[in-house]
Image (spheres, rainbow, N blue to C red):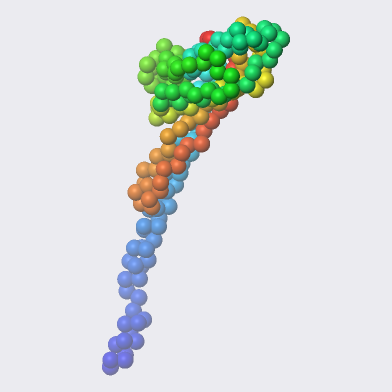
Amino acid sequence: MGQMSMRGFSRDDNGAVLVEVTVLIPILFIFVLGSVDFLFAFYQWNAAAKAVQLGARLAAVSAPMANGLTNLSNAVVSSGSLPGINPMPYFNVTCSGAGSCSCTGTCTGVVGYNATAMNTIVYGRGSADCNGASSIYNAGMCDFFNRIAPANVRIVYEQTGLGYAGRLGGPVPTITVSLQNLPFQFYFLGGLMGFGNIQIPASATITGEDLAG
């Protein structure tokens, strides 16, 4: 009798569906919510890419982040370079939205950080915050991706052989705009699976035009 009871218990499949559902539902939830998170991350990446492209364009035709960079072409003439003949010497100016600029190479007269220039790039022309642009022409980086603030922006001005000493429009650097301290936001996977912060890999490079704009 006892053996028959054990044999019947081992063959009893009542509740099997409930067990299967209990196992599958968490997997299904992770898959669905994970898909939502990854799609949102893709949206953030795309928006950030568009924002840095606009930021690079604005940086190419706006006042530079580093005070004195516009006059560097004339400053090297005062230091002995021949106007219209000598090439611009090498320089690399890196500015962080945290409020500082550093320079390596020839840095004659390049001092200080221009917060107004950063605000123009981030918020747009004539605007002091996100979504304040009156038209697409006046838009800034955060009009494309509203999580961007000045502290998230890094701009590098690097001399790459263009321009010459004494050029009226100033030096012609290569300008790279990138993001810093701006991770993807994972709403579900961060809590369910402990996803850590992943920095958004967005940057854009353009050749400077009129840094006095």
At horizontal 31% and vertical 86% (from top left) the residue drawn is: 6
Left or right: where does residue 85 sit relative to residue 172?
A: right
In the displayed image of the protein, which residue is found farthest to the right? 85
Whole-percent x and y of residue 43? 47, 36
Figure quadrant of the N terminus: bottom left
In which image quadrant can residue 172 be found? Answer: top right
Is any atom of residue 33 visible in this view?
no
In this rendered view, identify the residue nearer to me: 11 or 166.
166
Whole-percent x and y of residue 64? 51, 16
Whole-percent x and y of residue 5? 29, 87
Work out whether 11 lies above or below 27.
below
Is any atom of residue 2 visible in this view?
yes
Whole-percent x and y of residue 23? 37, 63
Work out whether 26 lies above or below 206.
below
In this rendered view, identify the residue nearer to me: 31 or 164.
164
At horizontal 39% and vertical 61% (from top left) the residue drawn is: 24
In which image quadrant can residue 20 be found? Answer: bottom left
